[in-house]
Each structure stands twice: as structure tokens, then as C-alpha cells.
Image: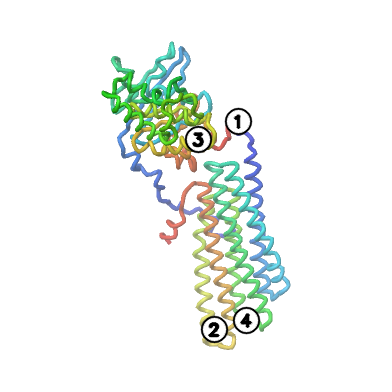
Amino acid sequence: MDKHRHLDDELSLLRDRVLLLGGETERALERAMFALTERDTAVANEVLDNDDRVDLLEVEIDRQCIDIIALRQPAARDLRFVISVAKMAPVLERIADHACNIARAAIDLNNEPEVKPVHDLSPMAAHALSMLRAALDAFTSGDAELAREVIKSDSEINNLYNHIFHRLIELMVTEPSTASRDARLLFVAKHLERIGDYVTDICELTVYMTEAAFIKHYHQRSN
Amino acid sequence: MLASMQTATPKIEVPQRKSEAPTTEDQRREAKVAVRDLDFFYGKSQALHGISLEIPERIVMAFIGPSGCGKSTFLRTLNRMNDVIPNTRAQGEVLIDGHDIYIAGTDVVELRRRVGMVFQKSNPFPKSIFENVAYGLRINRVTKSSSELSGRVEQALKDAALWEEVKDRLKSSALSLSGGQQQRLCIARALAIRPEVLLMDEPASALDPIATSKIEELIFDLKKHYTIVIVTHNMQQAARVSDQTAFFLLGKLIEVNTTEKMFTAPNERLTEDYITGRFG
């Protein structure tokens, strides 16, 4: 039987904190898209206000990882877990930053008449959220297979982005009066596309954590 | 959950890590030491079970494992130091440069000249610093003149990174040196007769962090010229100084691998449980 180690308690705390950060990030994205599609500026402001909490969590995770490496000197799967978490936390924080940028776009757009393509972003946002949830599930359960599936599904978000990109450019040409609003939506689409990339990074870290395999540049070349 | 995630898809193949590739520089080198199916007995008690292992030339290999796992016993089989323990017996082959050191007629003194040893506790003779290093050279009649002897002593002390600290007091008693210096003196003594393999049985376990660091730096430098095998209980030390690590448990060799692989992603569950402290 495995012996109980103090390190296990610390790793467990670290895992809980990452999942908390993941949950906050997920919620930030969900709420930012709600603020945009439902034109709810109050919700957008909530997302921005909560970002300090996300930043704080990231710093706490950083500190905890450094403490564990310095004081416990983890090896093998413990080391891979700590390294993965240390690299994952800033990625989650960046996703939350993108959610804040979407919230800022929502605040600007809510002061102007609605543009129809805003609803075209919903499937893209739903896909990004679904990817993020699945990536966090894969991390929690150490499921490298699921992580690989999520990585593959990033191509879907890229396709949606390309579609929206062309549609918005077309609109800017045909209806110049909405061009500034369309441009803001284009940025929102880009944020969602980048979130897909960040989720991919999280999944690559899960594969490393689980299988000690570096897939980052390999799967990028094969795409 | 994404719909596309509910169906199984083929696993993405990943490139083999450099350390796992079969043709690393270490593995291309000739084995300096090759052990085949080695069993070792203290009386009726079997301490080693069918150990097979190759140690390439000019690398540092660390032996790790819990107390009583056989790593020190195995280390001592490599220069037949166990011969001095009554009622012991070895079966199998230990080849140094392809020659079995256990065949009848082996010159054990010559073997121990080629395969030197440094022990856990520094054991300088109660003589001067100079005489400690010169001792092996004298009894082996290695040098022909006093100037050659002095030159060899100086070189050994330099190789052991001790020369600068003792060059002005070579006639002082070795016992006046600090623990770390005494251990480096013992290393100088082993190096003076120019062994090909250096066995080290927990050489820094009794030293403070600064002295330990000096020994570890020394090991790193020495591997340019020597094949070094080190037994250590300090896993971080094994990770710091060695190129390859072998894990022993209950007299069996569980895994031998590059140190990098051993400490990040060992092949065997038992190894992983040991180095992560999960043994209960």
C-alpha cells in the first residue's frame, strides 16, 4: 500500500487551486459572452471586477509550485504534475484576460445599436467553453486520450473563426456604417480563437503530466 | 462535452525523447564493466539475484535503493572487495574490459589498482598528507624516483581538487584536515595509482553541503578520465552527478536508465514509487 506523504496533501491543495482557477476562467468566459450577446453591461463589469481574483489565484499557484519544488524536490509523476500546473496557471490566467477583453468589447458595443453577427459568435464561444471544460476534465482525471481529442477539436474553432472573419469583412465592405462595430466583433472572434489555442496548451501539459510525452511541436507540425 | 470527443480516435504518436533513443552517446560507448547474471551470497543468504548490467566507459553511474537492497554489496563485487568477508560467494560474470574478474588466477591486487574505491567514511592513514597519497605508489612500486613520486602526488591532489588547499602543508598530518578535505585526500589516494574505474560508496554522506558540493563537482570533472560508480542514499545527489542510474530493491536490479529519464519518467512502477517516496 502507498504510504501517505505530506507531499500528497500539498499536491492535492495545488490541484484544488488549479481547478478553482479553471472554474473562475470558465465562468469569466461564459459571463463575458453572456454580456456580449445579451447586451448586459453589468455582467461585463462583474467579469472585469473578478479578474483580480484570477490574478491572485495565479500568483498563489506560482508560489505554491516554487515552494514544492524547493522544499519537497518532487520527482517523476509528482514533478511532472507540479511542472504542468506551474505552466498551466498562466495559460488559464491568459484565457481569463481574453474573457476580460471580450467583456470590454461588450461594454463598448452595448452603448451602440446591435449588430446581427454578434449571434454568429455564440457557436464559437460554446465550442471554446466546451473545449475548456473538457481540458479541465482531462487534467483532473489524468486522461491523456481526452486531452488529445480536445487538441484535435481546436481545428473546429479555427474553421468557425475563418467563417466569421470573412463574413465580418464582407459586412464592413457592404455596410460601412457598422464597420467599427464589426471590427470589435472581429477582435472578439480572435480572442475566442486564441482561447482555443490556449486550451490546446493545457491539453499538451496534461499529456506530458500523464505520459511524460512532449507533443507540443509535434502535433503542430502534423496539423 | 464535445460530441467529437465521445468517439475514440487513434492515439497521436509522439517522437521518441532523446534520452530514450537507443543510440545515445553513452550507449554507443563500449561497456567498461559488464555484469552478467550475478548472484551473491553471504553464507546461505542470497544478497544479489541475477544482476545483469553494463556500465559504459567514462560515465557516472549511480546506484540507488533502500538500505539493505544490495547496492553496496554489488558495488564491492566490482573489485572483489567482498572477498575479504568470510563465507561469501559470487556466481556469474563481472567483466572489466571483457575479462572476467572472478576467474581463477585473477590478480586481485592488480584488479583493485585498476578499480579503485572510496568509502563512506574518510579513512586517511595517520601519516602526512603527502604520505597518504604516496602510499599506494610506493607499495605498488609505481615510481622510479622521488621527483616522479612527488609529481604523481601533486597531480593526484590536483585531480582531487585539493592541491591549492594543502600544497603548503604536505608534511602536516592528514588527520588535521577537515572531513571534506580528508575525503578528497582519500580520492587523491585512489587516483594516484591511476585506476580506470572508481567506486564510491556514499562518499559525501558524512559531509556538510559545501564539502558535498566540492565532492560532486570533483566527480563531474573526474568522469572525463574515469568510469565512476557511486552508491548514494541521496536521490538529489544521484540526479545531480550521474549520467545513468540503477535502482536496486531486495537484491534485484529493478531498472537502469539515463538519470534524466529515471527522475522524470521511470519505466518501472517500483522505481517511481521509490524515488517519489511512496514506499510504505
For label 4, the residue is A115
Q: Mark 1 lies on which chain?
A: B
Mark 2 = which residue?
A171
Amino acid at dot 4:
Val
Q: Residue at x 46, y 22 (%)?
A: B123
Question: Could you tell me which residue is drawn at 51 percent across and 61 percent down?
Answer: A153
Q: Are marks 3 and 4 in contact (CB under 8 Å)?
A: no
Give the spatial CA distance, label 3 vs label 1: 29 Å
Q: How far apart are marks 1 and 4 (CA)?
A: 64 Å
Do the dots labelled 1 and 4 sit on one chain?
no
Binning the other alpha carbons within 10 Å of mark 2 as few (below 14), some (14 to 19) or many (20 upward) gives some
| CA–CA distance in space, label 2 to label 3 | 71 Å
Asked which secondary structure carries label 2, the reply is: helix
* Element under disc 1: loop
Mark sitting earlier along the chain (4/2): 4
> In this picture, is A172 found above or below B206?
below
As displayed, is residue A222 above or below residue B103? below
Residue marked by disc 3: B212
Tell me the tag on residue B166.
none
Depicted B199 relative to depicted A74: above or below: above
- Note whether residue B232 is visible: no
Q: How far apart are marks 1 and 2 (CA)?
A: 67 Å
Comparing A222 with B254, the one in front is B254
Disc 3 marks a residue whose amino acid type is Thr
Crowd rating for badge 4 (residues with CA inside 10 Å; few <14, some 14–19, many 20+): few
> Quick check: B134 above or below A135?
above
Q: Mark 1 points at which residue?
A: B280
> Picture coordinates of residue B184 (x, y %)?
44, 31
Which amino acid is tagged 2? Leu
Which quadrant of the figure contains the C terminus of chain A?
bottom left
Which of the chains bears the disc numbered 3?
A: B
Which chain is home to disc 2? A
